[in-house]
Image (spheres, rainbow, N blue to C red):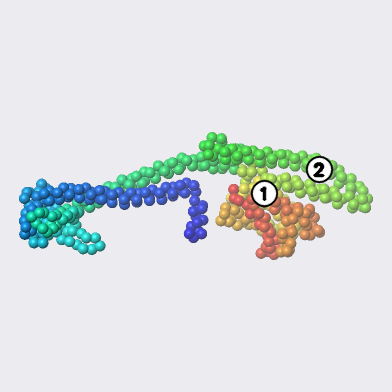
Amino acid sequence: MPNSKRFILKRLSLKSRLVLAAIVWLTAMVIAVGVSVPNQVFSYMVGDTKSQLSIYMDEISASLEADEKGNLTLTTNLSDPRFNRPYSGLYWSAKTDSDLLRSRSLWDQKIAVKKGIKKEYLGARDEKLIYLHTTLYYPDYDGPIEVLIGIDEQPIEDTVQDLMGQLWVILALLYFGVLAVIMLQVQWSLHPLTKMHKELSQLRSGDKTQLDEEYPKEVAPVVSDLNALIFHYQELLERARHHAGNLSHALKTPLSVLKNEITTFDDEHRQRLQPPVEQIQSQIDYHLGRARMAGSKNILAVRANPSERVDAISMAFDKVYASREVTLINELDSDIEVAVDKTDLDEMVGNLLENGYKWASSIIRVHSEQTTTGEINIIIEDDGPGIPEDKIQQAVQRGVRLDETTPGTGLGLNIVSEMAHSYRGILTLSRSSMGGLRAQLTFKLS
């Protein structure tokens, strides 16, 4: 099977798989019944006709006489009047080496033999016969007497054809009726999954905080585990954010006091104490950034508009870096929304835009590319010096600063990379067609 067909089969929904299996099974059964039943009926009718012919054969055998020369006579009339009606379709004949006696229904014809793969006997109008053949021996005649009795097969075939027409109508009604019942059964059986999908959508939109408990026993354990996982995640996330906020407030005041005190020291002591204090500040910034990476409290309901956030952030940076005269071009579609918390998107896009404002010569371009897998690439590129190819991977490592002359902690790109990863996204750095850095954030669409 080609890979494309195998891929399509794998992507079929449960409903489509069940309905497809039912269609295949029903079609096979209907065809089997439509073919086998007429054959069985035909065989039964032929067998019943031969049973009737055997009665006629016994009647002929009892009434037939032969003299010593082989001349044949029938002493009594047969009970079925069709033997006396020309071309009635019911015939008999008896012959010896010297004589041939036949029914009046043959008129001036004889029962003919058609040889082929299977021997066939033809009646007075060349109709195919259902027949019985036997050989008799009488005491007055030493030779064999061959008796053949046959009846037209066409009426049986016509009856079977009529039956087949009616049978196919019944089978068609049965086919579509059973298929409709199966589809209703599948719809009803899969309703809990449809309900779960609807509730998950409500979770994503923030209308619900957990799934309902009323599910069939086969699905209930999954729902229970999902609810437990969502509750556990939200509790851990709230606790982490709470601790991060407490840490920030607890360290901010003492650190500010230390910074102020250091400024009063002489140059020698200030140069010796200032690096450790800045290192403490760097570590606080890093771990607070990691705490923010966990995302929104309700991770399933988050969404943000990248175009709006870029506009808001660029307004602030235009003022901060006004002296650099950098122009930002925002080409993002205003209708696009990504499954990322607004605060976290600000953190990631803000870091990348700030790098652009620091290093761009004159232009920063922000645009997007939509993928075939329901994701979007948010691309931020500039016309600055960029990052050498051999140092791109190094640039996202924690604390790494490729240029010590520009202020910063070396945490920005690392935080962006880990934040994107927490939303099942990815940060990709490469050389821009404009000559500078091309930063690409890939997220799922909301």
* 214 vs 172: above or below: above
Q: Could you tell me which residue is drawn at 50 percent across and 58 percent down?
A: 4
From the viewer's side, name the closer residue of 220 and 210.
220
Residue 279 in picture, x, y percent from top left: 82, 50
Q: Could you tell me which residue is drawn at 60 percent across and 57 percent down?
A: 369
Task: Determine which of the numbered discs, if any, sits on residue 422 in the image.
Answer: 1
Using the numbered discs, state the Cα–Cα distance from disc 2 to disc 1 in whole angstroms: 27 Å
- Kindly identify which residue carries mark 2: 252
Quarter occupied by residue 370: bottom right
Which class describes the residues within 10 Å of circle 1: few (<14), some (14-19), or many (20+)? Answer: some
Residue 290 in picture, x, y percent from top left: 73, 47
Q: Which SS class for mark 2?
A: helix
Is residue 323 at all visible to an observer of this figure? no
Q: Could you tell me which residue is drawn at 89 percent across and 53 percent down?
A: 271
Amino acid carrying label 2: it is Lys
Residue 269 in picture, x, y percent from top left: 92, 50
| First in residue order: circle 2 vs circle 1 | 2
From the viewer's side, name the closer residue of 3 and 437.
3
